[in-house]
Amino acid sequence: SGGGGGWLNTNGGAAQQPSSASGGYGNAGGGNTFDNNYGRIPAGGGGGAGGAGNNGTPAVAGAGNGGIGFASSITGTSTYYAGGGGGGTSDGNTPGAGGAGGGGAGGTYSTNGTAGTANTGGGGGANATGGSGVVIISTPIAATSTTGSPTVTTSGGRTIYTFTSSGTITW
């Protein structure tokens, strides 16, 4: 997963990769540099699956945008998943936008950010929850049974099973 954005003269958090042969797609969060000349503390954006979060910039009073997600065409249509959440900032300044792939927008001291989009795995904006994940299986052979009510579609001669909750598939 992507790292969180930095705040108060800190770098963004490192990405946490799964311990598998294929690795993972997380990227670091953006950093922040506090500047006494401005008195603003915009946080960096969270890292996305396809890119790092952007740094918060005190001079322009803007928090960092979340990193872009990872584009996949497994369903037959290119879709981004796992965008980073936008950084938060002080009131009267500009929160960071969420990264493409369901990342939620950042907030301010008095307003929470927005949650990541459901079924994308997008990160939540400042002080908000991340979006739920999704499992998508594309196969040339139709399953003999499924549980959990996946959405079933076809594209290019393949059957695509999209699970947004627990379930099983059997061939």
Image (cartoon, grey):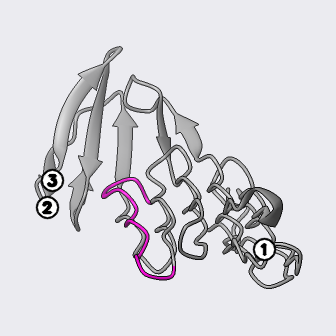
Image marks 2 and 3: residues in contact by CB distance under 8 Å? yes
Q: Position of residue 89 (x, y in %)?
A: 61, 73
Q: Quadrant of residue 92?
A: bottom right
Crowding around mark 2 (Cα neighbors within 10 Å: few <14, some 14 to 19, many 20+) is few
Q: Is residue 19 above or below residue 162?
A: below
Instruction: Inspect the magenta stretch and tell me whether residue 119 lies in it.
Output: yes
- The numbered mark at residue 146 is 3
Q: Is residue 85 above or below residue 51?
A: below
> Looking at the image, is mark 2 or mark 3 nearer the viewer?
2
Q: Is residue 83 above or below residue 61?
A: above
Residue type marked 1: Gly
Residue highlighted by disc 1: 12
Q: Position of residue 147 (x, y in %)?
A: 13, 60
Among numbered discs 3 and 1, the one appearing first in the sequence: 1
Crowding around mark 3 (Cα neighbors within 10 Å: few <14, some 14 to 19, many 20+) is few
| Measured Cα–Cα span from mark 2 to mark 3 | 7 Å
Q: Position of residue 47 (x, y in %)?
A: 67, 62
Among numbered discs 1 and 2, the one appearing first in the sequence: 1
- The numbered mark at residue 145 is none
Residue highlighted by disc 2: 148
Q: Nearer the viewer, residue 147 or 2?
A: 2
| Magenta stretch bounds | 109-121
Q: Position of residue 123 (x, y in %)?
A: 50, 65
- Which secondary structure class fits the magenta region best? loop
